[in-house]
Amino acid sequence: MTISELIAQLQVVIVAEGNIEVTCTGSALPDGYPGGALPDIFETTVETLKIGDHPTIGRSVRLYM
């Protein structure tokens, strides 16, 4: 997703819901991986942004949680 796409979607949320907290959900396991007793899933908020060069997608913004 590009920055402009993210901003457009967030603007729709602000109009509908107000300025609410944004969280990210992630996992170190691939989608569809069968879970064990404790799922490898976490949820957190964004703390900082850094711009850098990703080895496969090029210039990108990294979100630090």
Image (tube, rainbow, N blue to C red):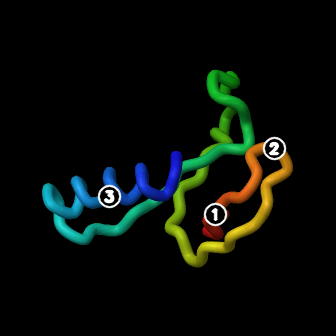
Q: Sequence-wise, which precedes: disc 2 or disc 3?
A: 3
SS for dot 2: loop
- Residue farthest left in this picture: 16
Marks 2 and 1 in Cβ contact (< 8 Å): no
The percent coordinates of residue 49 (x first, y second) are 61, 73
- In this view of the protein, which residue sits in the foreground, 57 or 30? 57
> Circle 2 sits on which residue?
56
Marks 2 and 3 in Cβ contact (< 8 Å): no
What's the residue at 73%, 36% (across, down)? 29
What's the residue at 66%, 63% (across, down)? 62
The percent coordinates of residue 65 (x first, y second) are 61, 68
> Circle 1 sits on which residue?
61
Q: Residues within 10 Å of mark 1 (few under 14, many from 20)?
A: some
Q: Sequence-wise, which precedes: disc 3 or disc 1?
A: 3
Marks 3 and 1 in Cβ contact (< 8 Å): no
For residue 55, above or below residue 23:
above
For residue 32, above or below residue 54:
above
Distance from the alpha carbon under mark 3 to that under mark 1? 16 Å
The percent coordinates of residue 55 (x first, y second) are 85, 50
> Circle 3 sits on which residue?
10
Q: Residues within 10 Å of mark 2 (few under 14, many from 20)?
A: few
